[in-house]
Image (tube, rainbow, N blue to C red):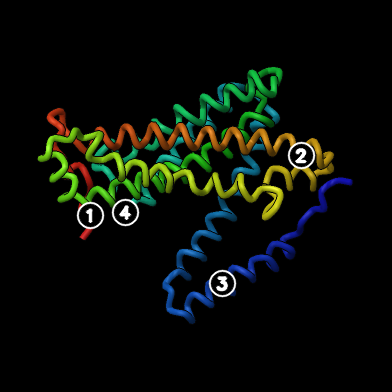
Amino acid sequence: MGVIPLSPIDLSLASLLILALAWMSFRLYLGLEKRILISALRTTVQLLLIGFVLRIVFDLAHPAWIALMAFIMLMAAGREVLARQKRKFKGWWGFGLGVTAMFTSSFTITLFALAVVIGTKPWYTPQYAIPLLGMLLGNTMNGISICLDRLTDTAWQQRAVIEQRLMLGQTSVEALLDIRRDSMRAGMIPIINSMAGAGLVSLPGMMTGQILGGSSPLDAVKYQILIMFLIAAGTGFGVMLALRLASRRLFDERHRLRLDCLVNKK
């Protein structure tokens, strides 16, 4: 049995839930109704556009088009990482930190999964490469965004404590160690929660999609386990690299704290 097609009316009925949520936000003075509606509109437009693009890319199956799409996905993820931070790094660093960390972790693990674990022929088969990279980038983006936001905001609030530790003879690594640990934990919490609750609390997206598409539940479970492991590794390595680069940026070569590299939000 194939997937039951959804009509525009079906999607319109589902959108009523979003309108109800925005209305409740307005009634409760939460101030989130504009963000909710804009995010819902962006979701609709972006997913419809990517649906048409994917159909073309899948038909062509040329590595150049796949590489271009991967590049666009990476740039968009880098922008989202920057947009979600309260105190971001100035200049190129604000954008480059997230992009570098995501590229190093997500792309490497995606290549490993395609060439070694799954063994697709050719390895860049778009039906596998693009969804895998998208899931890895999306989850790694969340982890990096959370950890960098926690790192920079906490460093700004505790700058006096950090400088006191430096005056007592600690290195920049030692003075920032507790903050880095907390930032690492914060960045990893979403994927740890997802792994802990998979199968008991929730049925993850890829598994649900395969089951709806008619795949065997056991085959869907195997792929979901693979995806969860890949996402956890990609998020973990990406968060570690982002924290390492960001921590070094917060100090100069003489281990002095330099918060002038951050945007000061009043």
Mark before the other along the chain sequence, 1 or 2: 1
Asked if the residues shown at circle 3 and circle 2 are in contact, with their CB atoms under 8 angstroms apart, the answer is no
Q: Looking at the rendering, in which quadrant would you find the C terminus?
A: bottom left
Residue for point 20% across, 53% down: 264
Residue named by callout 2: 220
Question: Which is in the foreground here, disc 3 or disc 4?
Answer: 4
The residues tagged by marks 1 and 2 sit, at their Cα atoms, a distance apart of 46 Å
- Identify the secondary structure beneath mark 4: loop
Quadrant for residue 214, please give it: top right
The residue under label 3 is which amino acid type?
Answer: Leu
Mark before the other along the chain sequence, 1 or 4: 4
Q: Residues within 10 Å of mark 3 (few under 14, many from 20)?
A: some
Asked if the residues shown at circle 2 and circle 4 are in contact, with their CB atoms under 8 angstroms apart, the answer is no
Residue named by callout 4: 86
- State the image coordinates of residue 179 (x, y, percent, origin top left): 31, 45
The residues tagged by marks 2 and 4 sit, at their Cα atoms, a distance apart of 38 Å
Mark before the other along the chain sequence, 3 or 1: 3
Question: Which is in the foreground here, disc 3 or disc 2?
Answer: 2
- State the image coordinates of residue 123 (x, y, percent, origin top left): 65, 19
Compared to residue 115, the image places residue 200 above or below, namely below
Q: Residues within 10 Å of mark 1 (few under 14, many from 20)?
A: few
- Identify the secondary structure beneath mark 2: helix
| Residue 39 vs residue 191, the one in the foreground | 191
113 lies left or right of 176: right
- Identify the secondary structure beneath mark 3: helix
Compared to residue 111, the image places residue 262 above or below, namely below
149 lies left or right of 24: left
